[in-house]
Image (cartoon, rainbow, N blue to C red):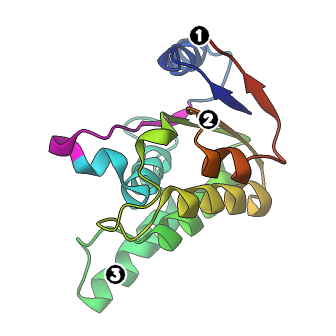
Amino acid sequence: LTVHTSGRSIVIEHLIQSFRQGRNPRPIYFYCTRNVSEKERSSSTAILSSLVRQMSCLEDGSPILQPVRDKYEERKKQGFPSIPPCLEESRDLIIALTAYYPLTTIVIDALDEIDAFDQCDEASRTDLLEALEQILLRSSNLVKVFISSRNDQDIVRHLANCPNLEIEA
């Protein structure tokens, strides 16, 4: 489901409240921004890495799930345990982690804040959208993706075949 709205954080707050009341699984989410002092908030790679971190434990205080431990050990053997995963590695980890959750709800707030043509980020928002599509197609359990955005044409084109709900002021 894609929503184009200015009140998008309301959705995340609602999902968190629903989780706290035991009605839904914990949502994983990311707030994008184009703020120069927070460049990681507009990086497709950082977004997927954040989603992996949020999914890496079934609940707060529980052990880190096996796919994440395996990736860390693999990186450690190569001598690069602290380097963040690339977009494809994060995508594949998310796909593997969805097997531990009966339902995964991913919310990306303000996708339009990621510059589609940012030469500083190796992965554009098109890459992020394609990664989310792969997560939907390849995950073993149900995954729902909720994206809020302005109607930037590249986003509209990429999501043209997805269910859309448009809300305007």
Q: Residue at x 62, y 52 (%)?
A: 154
9 vs 84, nearest the viewer: 9
| Tag 2 residue | 151
**Residue 103, horizontal then vertical, whole percent:** 72, 39
Real-space Cα separation, disc 2 to disc 3, in angstroms = 39 Å
100 vs 148, nearest the viewer: 148
**Residue 22, horizontal then vertical, whole percent:** 63, 16
Real-space Cα separation, disc 3 to disc 1, in angstroms = 38 Å
Q: Residue at x 61, y 35 (%)?
A: 151
Q: Is residue 34 magenta?
A: yes
Q: Residue at x 77, y 50 (%)?
A: 141
Seen in the picture, residue 24 relative to 89 is either above or below; the reply is above
**Amino acid found under the numbered disc labelled 2:** Asn
- Mark 1 lies on a secondary structure that is loop
**Amino acid found under the numbered disc labelled 3:** Arg
Residue furthest left as drawn: 37
- Mark 3 lies on a secondary structure that is helix
**Residue 119, horizontal then vertical, whole percent:** 34, 68
Q: Earlier in the sequence, mark 3 or mark 1?
A: 1
108 vs 117, nearest the viewer: 117
- Position of the C terminus, as image quadrant, is top right
Real-space Cα separation, disc 1 to disc 2, in angstroms = 33 Å
Query: In this rendering, would 108 be left or right of 80?
Result: right
**Amino acid found under the numbered disc labelled 1:** Gln
Front of the two marks 1 and 2: 2
Q: Residue at x 42, y 51 (%)?
A: 47
The magenta segment is: 27-38
| Tag 1 residue | 21
Q: How packed is label 2: few (under 14 Cα within 10 Å), some, or many (20 or more)?
A: some
Residue furthest bottom as drawn: 78
Q: How packed is label 1: few (under 14 Cα within 10 Å), some, or many (20 or more)?
A: few
Q: Tell me the tag on residue 75.
A: 3
